[in-house]
Image: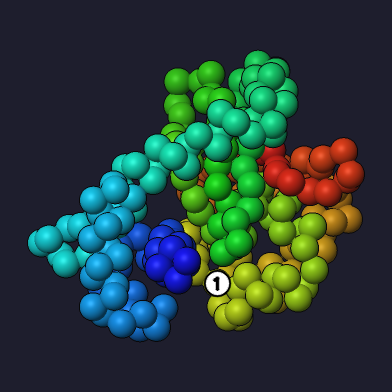
Amino acid sequence: MSSLLKAIAILNAFSPDKPELKVAELSLKLGIPIPTLYRILSILTKAGLLEKKPSKGTYVIGRTLYTVGSLYLSTTDLYRAAEPIIQAINDITGEVTNVSILDDKGYIVMLLREESKHPLRHVVHVGSTSPAYAHASGKALLSALTDEEIDRLYPEEKLKRLTSKTVSTKTELKRELEQVRKNGYAFNSEQAYEGVEAVASVIRNARGNVIAATAI
């Protein structure tokens, strides 16, 4: 059981900010002795859950883990319920329409996407992740959280910018989220990508809890 928990901790150590990790980094971050790490990493690599890049001496998420994770898309009730709605919105607007969820690290994860019907397109793949504070769907999801929960997701005052218009401080983000709560929707103008604007709203389950967001 102890080894299994260590293996789970190793897999959870990878993030959009740290997609590649060295053994020394993992040892320092997780407090696992290097000899133990090597044994677990060897097993995870053989299973295809991780891949090693010998030229860099780093490890990355493996194809098997991606394949297993992608099964979530085909089994979740959210996917089945949202798909026809997203397609209908896409037909009406002709614009990119997507559904995203919020992970426990402050990133949105795209679950479903219908592409624009226009020749000029902005392409982002299903399964991609990005800082929630820079996206309309992310702000819609963050608006359902308390200030304390926002502080846990983003402990630093400064936020990394994706463009020159990205919200750059947590204080500014909280002000924007207050407006999102008042309006009932989130708007984003070129904060994630230059030349791209979006509007988003949360998706609630039968109990009224926010479980995802949809954006155009």
Q: Work out which residue is located at the far front of the displayed protein and give it.
A: 1
The percent position of residue 60, horizontal first and vertical second, equals 29, 57
The percent position of residue 146, horizontal first and vertical second, equals 80, 68
Amino acid type assigned to the residue bearing label 1 in the image: Leu
Q: Quadrant of residue 103?
A: bottom right
Which quarter of the figure is the C terminus placed in? Answer: top right
Callout count? 1
For image coordinates 51% across by 20% down, the residue present is 118
Depth check: 147 or 172 in front? 147
Q: Is residue 42 above or below residue 94?
A: below
Question: Taking the image as drawn, is residue 133 in sight?
Answer: yes
For image coordinates 69% across by 31% down, the residue present is 77
The percent position of residue 162, horizontal first and vertical second, equals 47, 60
Depth check: 145 or 93 in front? 145
Task: Count neighbours of disc 1 (C-alpha within 10 A) and say few if under 14, some if 14 to 19, many if 20 or more.
Answer: some
Left or right of residue 37, residue 155 in this image: right
The percent position of residue 169, horizontal first and vertical second, equals 61, 74
Q: Is residue 101 above or below residue 8?
A: above
For image coordinates 30% across by 56% down, the residue present is 44
Left or right of residue 41, residue 205 in this image: right
SS at mark 1 in the image: loop
Location of mark 1 (residue):
159
Q: Is residue 146 above or below residue 126?
A: below
For image coordinates 73% across by 71% down, the residue present is 149
Question: Taking the image as drawn, is residue 24 in sight?
Answer: no
Depth check: 173 or 18 in front? 18
Q: Work out which residue is located at the far left of the displayed protein and give it.
A: 55
Q: Quadrant of residue 180?
A: bottom right
- Colour mode? rainbow
